[in-house]
Amino acid sequence: MNFWYFLTALTLLSALMVVFAKNPIHSVLYLVFTFFCISGHYVLLNAQFLMAVNIIVYAGAIMVLFLFVIMMLDLRKNVPESKSNLTKLAGAVLGGTLLVVFIAATRHMNLGNGSGAIGAQTGMVESLGMILYKDYLLPFELVSVLFFVAMVGAVMLGKREAGERNF
Amino acid sequence: MNYQPSDYLPIIVQLGAALAFIVLTMVATHWLGPKRHSSKKDDVFECGIESIGDARTPISVKYFLVAILFVLFDVEIVFMYPWAVNFKELAWDGFVEMVVFMSFLLLGFIYVIKKGVLKWEK
Amino acid sequence: MEITSTLFAAKAIYIGLIFAITLGVAAYSTYGERIVAAWMQDRVGPDRAGPFGIFQPLADAVKMFMKEDFIPANSSKWLFIAWPCLSMLTALLTSAVVPFGDKLDLGGGIEMDLQGIDVNIGILWVFGIVSLGVYGILVGGWASNNKYSLLGAIRAASQNISYELAMGLSIIAILMMTGSLSTKVIVETQQNGAGFLSWNIWSQPIGFVIFIVCAFAECNRTPFDLPECETELIGGYHTEYSSMKLGFYLFSEYINMFVSGAVMATLYFGGYDYPFNEVVEAQFGQNIAALVGVGALMGKALFFVFVFMWVRWTLPRFRYDQLMNLGWTGLIPISMFNVVWTGLSILIPTTFNLPAWASIVVSWSGIGVLLIGLIIYHGATSKKKTVALAH
């Protein structure tokens, strides 16, 4: 339990640093660290496969993509000026609304008393696979359609225009 | 086999050993080496030519496309792990499921190749 | 498995030992690299530091330590320092799931696996940590604020992520046969049966070739060492690095070589399994048999390290477009084919009640099918090319 508190504090701290870091590259690196902390939480929950997937997909793949995107941007030009008060107000209202939604959603959530409904080995890759490929077959196949669309979309967005500056 | 979170305890030892080794080495090399600064020497080395501007300029969009394709394929591979582990139980059903899944991906892959995204010489 | 304090202490000692062995092997791989290079090129090689030059790694280490810890003025200082360390850290953590040996009897009813952590996700640990190795290169090159470093870093990162895919797909074919991600289980399924005849290499020839090619690319070894090729990009992503920061980058490459050799041995060559291990166990007891197994795994891993060096002095370097083409349009489709064909080689014998060797026949016939497919594909594309040239 003590370890849980330590890990949670670390997670929150690094998540806050993502927001407060001035340099976008630093933000990405703090985000990678946040994902590691979340993986630690998965280990504590004995969701071992999720832990590995979290590292491979989020920390290993999506964050690399983020880094590439940041490197593609011209950071010098896009240094944001200090935001106007209107932007700050809009941000506060939006964030507050999201918070209200979260609180409302979690208040009526039935967490149960945690007794025995789920076995300790549910988070292992074998049991996850049986559930995914027997009970949730259609969503799984639909995911491949989603991938297909994403690929086409990426190609459409990333197609090189004539006269663009490249290395 | 009964897997538990405590299986991961020994990794803390390994992490500790690795961190100790790295920190000690970095501190040692920092203390041992000489330190002589000059404005020319502290410049970056670009084949001896005077460095102009900042290195952090935008890069080719091609790398970005490779990265985005990598993310898509990586997620696909992650989906295949639980399938591969249960392959013998799922048998032909699982085989057909995965062939359908993979053929969609292959379709996208062929589209990407036909569009010339992975052609580097152009 | 319950972890008692005695067992934990034993595990800690074991991890310390493996740690020391990994560092020692990596250090002496640099010496081995020079010896192999000298042997291939008919030279003498290092012979000054001690008898046969065996203190050469020590001399190199002292030199590295005594160099100036140079940090360019325009670089991001902390990232510049931290990122070689991360490269080293990821290299040192991969070996945790590799089973170096069978159970060791410690007396008092305590048995310890000669393996850092035996977890459910096993091989995914390696995959996850390897995927983090990209950061060490990418951010390291970016932090230098050198144009050549950045270019080298981005090229290296693209290369690493491209070859990671084919690597993951080739692992999947192994998992279909073993039905578990745990490296321990992967080794144990290769143990039953007749000695080395039950190793995975016999049913996964295509997968192994894909895996070893990807291992070369992931370790940035020749013929895939473009990120640091001197003729195009000075020193690539580590142009600006000096002293032990450079040492970490180079050292992590050698550690990765050793660990990937051990992983290849685990996945395809039976891990710590060796012929007649039952006889040894019956004759000399469990502990001796386990230690011989450790020796067997080390031997296999070191052989792969030798292969890495052998290839370095045999093959020329790829061009970047060739490298990316091989990764994307070559290895990924082939490894997808391998997954499907492995599925057939498992399902056909069980459905038609064929004997076990039928599955091996099916898997090897996959090579033939693949070759025919490649020839047809090549014929089709080369015809197109000649048509295009004629116009």
Image: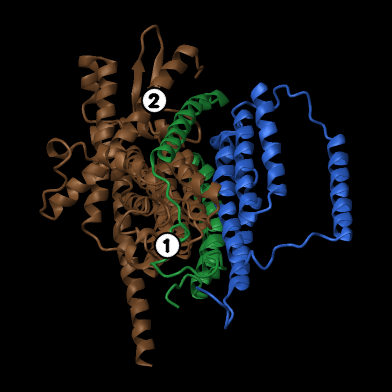
Chain colours: A blue, B green, C brown
Picture residue at 39% right of the left edge, 64% below the top:
C330
Depth check, front residue: A39 or C389: A39
Q: Tell me which corner region of the image, top left, top right, bottom left or bottom right, holds residue A114.
A: top right
Q: Is residue C135 left or right of residue A153?
A: left
Picture residue at 57% right of the left edge, 60% below the top:
A68
Q: Tell me which corner region of the image, top left, top right, bottom left or bottom right, holds residue C340.
A: bottom left
* Helix, strand or loop status at disc 2: helix
Q: Quadrant of the C terminus of chain B?
A: bottom left
Q: Position of residue B58 (x, y in %)?
A: 57, 68
Q: Report which residue position mark 1 lands on.
A: B45
Depth check, front residue: C115 or B75: C115
**The disc labelled 2 sits on which kind of residue?**
Gly
Q: Report which residue position mark 2 lands on.
A: C16
Q: Does any portion of residue C377 appear in the rendered image?
A: yes
Chain letter of the residue carrying label 2? C
Q: Is residue C20 left or right of residue B118?
A: left
Q: Position of residue C24 (x, y in %)?
A: 30, 34
Chain letter of the residue carrying label 1? B
Q: Tell me which corner region of the image, top left, top right, bottom left or bottom right, holds residue A49.
A: top right
Q: Residues within 10 Å of mark 1 (few under 14, many from 20)?
A: many
Q: Is residue A20 left or right of residue B74?
A: right
Q: Is residue C271 above or below residue C336?
A: above
